[in-house]
Structure formats: structure tokens, C-alpha cells
């Protein structure tokens, strides 16, 4: 789970590689490195910690020049964060960068040590470069050496290989992302589009089992046995400026403020005729959805799992189809019961989440249909799926997901309405029409964010928080607590309001702030009873309430008001104050908001 950048062309590659790594910092990393080839000599530099440490080393090398190079930011899986474990890894003639995990690295290490190979790191990745060296000595062919190496590898990998003997880079992948960029002044490689979007908008998406041989003039694509393959160059019309902070202090704050637009973009072209019609462009599933479907399984991780819980509420309430929601990291280990009448909905912002991808592959083998919900075009999970519903959130750079979450639940709401239409020919226009009002209501909350900033000043020194919600707002309580944990490092728990008395109530005293969602829906009276239980125990109460409810102020320390909305739409509004509160608390505390410790944006290892 890290960043890869490569370049071969007419330019000096140093600045391109460093710039690419900078644009991939959002993925999370603990060390970084670069290797540049010039006239048969490879110069390699690595540094532990933040990318600035590598930049200091690299820019002190006045003679570092070359038109071919690879670079990497690492997130430790095997071996502690250190310079020796940082990528690129090298042998006599080759250097590599690698994303993923080599599951059989111990056996490969034994194989290499018996053949007098010196291993210099604690990583699984280093075995790749030494295997290439070993097979090159045997085959005397760069491509054959890589092909033979791939035969030995078990696990997930996206790899770039640079040789001091030839002016080319070889890229190959399995279960980890890799894209190629086609430019006018050379060719580019990366693990994610933002790394190279400033240089080209023409991309080749490598599929599992593919290997590319890249020179500055051309790209050749083969399978792992070196049989030639055709490829398609896709043009991605997205501005590099979309990945910049603009006027905002952090990407996360920018992305919170982009939610009205991203939700509108997600509805656009799908909710038609002012809410009278819906079209999701997944017609290949229509017959299955109408005549065969008897169960839906949603599988996801983290914030996407929370959106799945809300999706369950939407689908069961609107379409009346049974839904299970599973953590992807647990799903394939519990021997789930699936059949050809099951629809699996994997949810992943990146489309590369390793646990979710593994769950997709397992369900695919069992014959279930797969409908992905994803934000990244043509990423691995959509490619493994029968159909995909994209969330048009645009690039999300902050590690803590915000606009990806609200666009995911936007898609799930539309799917629930679409499923009802396919199965009963009834279009629930009231939901579609109210959905179109959401952007304006969200902007109203964002315009009044100063009050939430003031709350963060008041509460940022508390060490524990409890978040409570009922019905469709319970997952919002979970999400609010997760956001606070992720970026401020304050302990927080989310609970169903009705479960408070079954344990968490023991924690409540004057030192325990409680966020409670008390908007005006059919659960309000029960939630109000929970609120009074907290008040009786002197807990600090922060309520999210519907505008016009003045009475609630008598029972709370603070109230955040949101516009009135139908119960299906409350999650869209109620999550915004929680995102803002978490952001402001983290900023006051001085944490690394966009890249919180120990976390990564795209979790590509299990």
C-alpha cells in the first residue's frame, strides 16, 4: 500500500518522479526512494520518513541526471520503516519498486540464499529483484527473466523493473493497481492517476496477468508468458487542479466543502426529468434483478462499510429485498452462503481495497452477480464486476473519507429506487425529487460552519466521545466516531441510541461529551428519552436537531441545526457537522489531518 512512479523519455526524470511521489502522498507512506539510469549507471537514493527527507538527499546531488527512472513511497508491511527497507531494491543489474505482498517470500529467500545471494533488507519485495537477476544470468533476456520471476511469485504485486543494461522499463501486475501514461515526450507509469495527470491524460490500465515493456518511443503489452496482447488507450478528462487544495488549508476541508457538488454530479444523468425517471445504465442486470434476485450482500471496509449499512436500510425499506452487510476483511473467512440468485455489492472508494477485492473474487467463483460501487474508473474491483455504479466524487486526497462516503450513499439510494422500479414498475419519485434538493441543504450547513468551529474549541480537550443514533442514523453515529478517531486520535465510539443502556451508559459523567442525532423523525421520542438519560448522569450533550426544534435546547449543552429532510435523507445532512467537527478538532490539536498516522488512503494489503 504505497505509491509508484516511473518515467522514460526525453526529459530529466528526477523532477517528474519527485513530483509524482508528492501527488501520491495521500496514499500514506513511511519512507521513499528513487532510482535514475544514465549511461548504464543506476543511482539510487532512499530516505526514511516523509518525502521531504528524500527531497533533501536528491536535490543535494547536483549531477543526478537521467531520462529513465522509477520511484516509490512505502508503507511498511514486512520490515520496519527504515532506509534499508525503503524501495527501490537493487541487485547487480536491476532495481525494482513493488506494491503489494509476496506471500511466499520466505521460501524465495531460502532459494536465493542457497545460491549465495546477499539479502540486505527485511522486506518481501527485495526477493523480486534478486530473482530477476538470477533468471537473467540464466536466460540472458530481460523479458524472460521477468517472466520466469513472475512464475515464482505468490501474492499481490504491481512492479516496475529498471535495468542498467537496457533503456526500458518493465511493468507487471496482479491484484495491485498499475497504470501507464502515454505522453508526447515519453511514457509514464504510476500506481494512481494523480501522480502523472499533470503530464498526460492518456492512460493504459494494466489488467491482472499483464506485463508491459516500455521504451520512450512505444509500449508493448504481453501476458506473463510473453504472448502479445492488444491494449486500449483511454483519455481521462479531469483537471489536475481537482487534486490541489486551492483556498483550503487541508484537502479534507476542501473535500467536505465539495460534497454538494459531488452529490449533484453523482445524481446527474441518472435522476431524470426532475425526479420523474431514473436510469443507472446497468441494464445487463435487469433480468437478473427482476426474476432471479433473492438476496443482496454488501461487503466493504471502514467508511465504505458504514455506507453499506445505510444502503441496507435504503434497499430493504424501498425495494423490500433482504440485505446482509459484511466486513470484507471477515467475509471470505466465514464460509458465506451464496448462490446464483445473490447480488454482491462491493463498495470501495479506490477500487483497489485488498480485502474487498478478495471478497469479490471469492463471490465470483461461487456464481453470484457483482455490482460494484466505486470512485476510481477502471480500477480492479470494477473490472472484476458484472456492472459498476461510479460515484462521481472526483479525486479524494484526504485519507479520511468524506465526499466518497456521501456519494456512495447517493448511489445506494438510487439503486434502491431503481431496484424497486425493475421489480414492480413503480418509480418512487418522492425520493428522487427530494434527492435533488440535497445539494442546497448541504451548502446551507457548510455556510454556517463557524458554529461547529466554535464547538471544536469548546470540546477539543476531552479524551473520549460517545456518538448515538437510531435507525438510518446509527451508521452516521459510527461514521462520526470514526472520523474523530482517524484524524484527531481521540477515542470515540458509535452506538445505536437504544443500546446505550446496555453498557455505554456506565461511562457517562460530566467528562463524557455525547453526540446524539435527534432529528425530527419517527424515532425522535425514543431518542429524546435517551437524551434525558444522558442529562440525568451529567453527560455533556451535543445534539443534531431539525431546524425549528427550540425545546431541545433546554436539555442540551449545544445544538447543531440541520434542515428538515425525509428519514432517508437525514444521513446526508447529519454526517456533515460530524465531519466538520472532527476536522476542526484535529486542526486545533495540530495533527496531520490529510495523512493521519498509521493510515493509508488505498489499503492494498490484507
Image: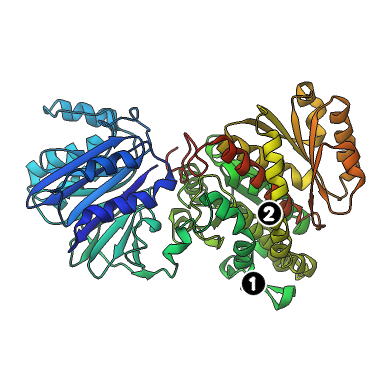
On screen, residue 581 versus residue 531, left or right, reads left
On screen, residue 219 versus residue 334, left or right, reads left
Mark 2 nearby-residue class (10 Å; few <14, some 14–19, many ≥20)? some
The x and y percentages for residue 13 are: 21, 56
- Tell me the residue at 86%/50% (across/down): 520
Identify the residue position indicated by label 2 in the image.
294
| Quarter location, residue 485 | top right
Q: Are marks 2 and 1 in contact (CB under 8 Å)?
A: no
The x and y percentages for residue 89 are: 22, 38
The x and y percentages for residue 254 are: 56, 55
In this picture, is 139 found above or below 501? below
The x and y percentages for residue 31 are: 33, 37
Q: Residue furthest top?
A: 506
In this picture, is 272 found above or below 223? below
- Tell me the residue at 24%/59% (across/down): 222
Count every numbered label the image shows and give the total: 2
| Quarter location, residue 221 | bottom left
Say which label, 2 or 1, has the lower sequence index. 1
Q: Nearer the viewer, mark 2 or mark 1?
A: 1
- The quarter of the image holding the C terminus is top left
Q: Is residue 224 visible?
A: no
Element at label 1: loop
- Tell me the residue at 50%/51% (across/down): 364
- The quarter of the image holding the N terminus is top left
In this picture, is 214 found above or below 305? below
Q: Residue furthest bottom?
A: 273
Identify the residue position indicated by label 1 in the image.
279
Amino acid at each position: 500500500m504505497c505509491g509508484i512512479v516511473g518515467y522514460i523519455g526525453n526529459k530529466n526524470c528526477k523532477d517528474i518522479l519527485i513530483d509524482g511521489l508528492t501527488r501520491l502522498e495521500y496514499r500514506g507512506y513511511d519512507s521513499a526512494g528513487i532510482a535514475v539510469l544514465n549511461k548504464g549507471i543506476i543511482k539510487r537514493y532512499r530516505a526514511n520518513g516523509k518525502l521531504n527527507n528524500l527531497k533533501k538527499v536528491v536535490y543535494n546531488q547536483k549531477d543526478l541526471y537521467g531520462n529513465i527512472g522509477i520511484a516509490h513511497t512505502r508503507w511498511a508491511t514486512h520490515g520496519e520503516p527504515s532506509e534499508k527497507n525503503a524501495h527501490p531494491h537493487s541487485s547487480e543489474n536491476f532495481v525494482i519498486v513493488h506494491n503489494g505482498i509476496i506471500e511466499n517470500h520466505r521460501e524465495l529467500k531460502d532459494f536465493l540464499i542457497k545460491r549465495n545471494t546477499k539479502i540486505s533488507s527485511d522486506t518481501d519485495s527485495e526477493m523480486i529483484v534478486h530473482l530477476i537477476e538470477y533468471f537473467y544470468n540464466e536466460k540472458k533476456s530481460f523479458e524472460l527473466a521477468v517472466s520466469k520471476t513472475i512464475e515464482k511469485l505468490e501474492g499481490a504485486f504491481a512492479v516496475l523493473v529498471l535495468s542498467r543494461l537496457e533503456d526500458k522499463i518493465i511493468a507487471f501486475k496482479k491484484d495491485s493497481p498499475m497504470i501507464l501514461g502515454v505522453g508526447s515526450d515519453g511514457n509514464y507509469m504510476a500506481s494512481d492517476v494523480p501522480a502523472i495527470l499533470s503530464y498526460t491524460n492518456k492512460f493504459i490500465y494494466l489488467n491482472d496477468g499483464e506485463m508491459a515493456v516500455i521504451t520512450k518511443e512505444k509500449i508493448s503489452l504481453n501476458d506473463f508468458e510473453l504472448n502479445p496482447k492488444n491494449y486500449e488507450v483511454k483519455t481521462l478528462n479531469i483537471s489536475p487542479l481537482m487534486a490541489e487544495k486551492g483556498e483550503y488549508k487541508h484537502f479534507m476541508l476542501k473535500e467536505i466543502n465539495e460534497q454538494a457538488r459531488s452529490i449533484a454530479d453523482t445524481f446527474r444523468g441518472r435522476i431524470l426529468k426532475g425526479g420523474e425517471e431514473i436510469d443507472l445504465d446497468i441494464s445487463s442486470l435487469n433480468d437478473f434483478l427482476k426474476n432471479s434476485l433473492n438476496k443482496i450482500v454488501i461487503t466493504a471496509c471502514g467508511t465504505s462499510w458504514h455506507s453499506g449499512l445505510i444502503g441496507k436500510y435504503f434497499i430493504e425499506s424501498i425495494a423490500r429485498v433482504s440485505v446482509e452487510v459484511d466486513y470484507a476483511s471477515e467475509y471470505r473467512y466465514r464460509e458465506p452462503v451464496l448462490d446464483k440468485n445473490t447480488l454482491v455489492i462491493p463498495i470501495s472508494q479506490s477500487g483497489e481495497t485488498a480485502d474487498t477485492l478478495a471478497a469479490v473474487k471469492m463471490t465470483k467463483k461461487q456464481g453470484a452477480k457483482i455490482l460494484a460501487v466505486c470512485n476510481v474508473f477502471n480500477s480492479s474491483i470494477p473490472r472484476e464486476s458484472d456492472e459498476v455504479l461510479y460515484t462521481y466524487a472526483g479525486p479524494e486526497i484526504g485519507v479520511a473519507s468524506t465526499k466518497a462516503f456521501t456519494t456512495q450513499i447517493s448511489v445506494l439510494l438510487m439503486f434502491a429506487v431503481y431496484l424497486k422500479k425493475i421489480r414492480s414498475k413503480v418509480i418512487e419519485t418522492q425520493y428522487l425529487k427530494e434527492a435533488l434538493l440535497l445539494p442546497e441543504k448541504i451548502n446551507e450547513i457548510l455556510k454556517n460552519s463557524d458554529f461547529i468551529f466554535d464547538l471544536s474549541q469548546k470540546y477539543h480537550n476531552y479524551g473520549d466521545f460517545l456518538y448515538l443514533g437510531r435507525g438510518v442514523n446509527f451508521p452516521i453515529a459510527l461514521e462520526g466516531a470514526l472520523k474523530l478517531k482517524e484524524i484527531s486520535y481521540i477515542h470515540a465510539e458509535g452506538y445505536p441510541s437504544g443500546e446505550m443502556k446496555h453498557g455505554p451508559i456506565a461511562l457517562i459523567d460530566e467528562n463524557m461529551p455525547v453526540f446524539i442525532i435527534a432529528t425530527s423523525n419517527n424515532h425522535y421520542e425514543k431518542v429524546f428519552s435517551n437524551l434525558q438519560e444522558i442529562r440525568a448522569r451529567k453527560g455533556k450533550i451535543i445534539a443534531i436537531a431539525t431546524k425549528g426544534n427550540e425545546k431541545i435546547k433546554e436539555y442540551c449543552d449545544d445544538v447543531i441545526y440541520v434542515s428538515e429532510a425525509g428519514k432517508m435523507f437525514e444521513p446526508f445532512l447529519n454526517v456533515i457537522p460530524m465531519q466538520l467537527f472532527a476536522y476542526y478538532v484535529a486542526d486545533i490539536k495540530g495533527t496531520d489531518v490529510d495523512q493521519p498516522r498509521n493510515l493509508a488512503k488505498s489499503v492494498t494489503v490484507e
